[in-house]
Image (cartoon, rainbow, N blue to C red):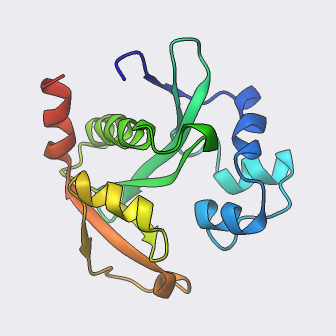
Amino acid sequence: MESLSLKPIEEWQFPTLMSWLPDREQCQQWGGPKFRFPLERASFLEDCRWPELPSYTLQDSSGDALAFGQYYQHLGRCHLSRLIVTPNHRGAGIGRALIIRLAQTGARTLDATECSLFVLRTNFAARNLYEKLGFVAAAYPGQREWLEQCDFMVAPSKVFLQKEKTK
């Protein structure tokens, strides 16, 4: 996994990312219930809030995008969002690498002591990964119309920053 690098996404890479979301269900699982489908470039960029939000791809040594994620400050935390691994690399540790690197980058940039994310209650693979990385379910201090479908999870950012030191 050492040959992987986290790099800001470039606009020309979005069609690749769009190809990872072949149907409405997967699109909304990833982007949320208000993410428009079918995917069109202009609405996709708008719904992703690019370049407003820090948006990254995890790339292999040849520059191919293997995963995507964003972060932003939410409730005083580094909130990770829109995390996805290319379908043909799922289950190979790419999601773990993405989350660690994205959390390290976001926590440092935002000077955040905690990271957070939402996970659909039906996304057992993602929840399992997040728990292995140190995320725990927490009460969400607000109300959102889609919150009954998700859990809010938090983890101390030092967990990810320590992984950086032990590489």
What is the x, y in percent for residue 65? Answer: 60, 28
Residue 88 appears left or right of 93: right
40 over 1 or under it: above or below: below
> Residue lying furthest top in this view?
62
- The residue sitting at 65% across, 51% down in the picture is 48
What is the x, y in percent for residue 141? Answer: 31, 81
- The residue sitting at 44% across, 37% down in the picture is 92
Residue 11 appears left or right of 90: right
Marks counted in the figure total 0
- Front position in the image: 102 or 92: 92
Residue 77 appears left or right of 165: right
- Front position in the image: 149 or 80: 149
48 over 160 or under it: above or below: below
Report the quarter where the C terminus lies.
top left
Report the quarter where the N terminus lies.
top left
108 over 3 or under it: above or below: below
What is the x, y in percent for residue 122? Answer: 49, 75
- The residue sitting at 62% across, 44% down in the picture is 87
In the rendered image, which quarter is residue 131 located in? Answer: bottom left
- The residue sitting at 14% across, 44% down in the picture is 158
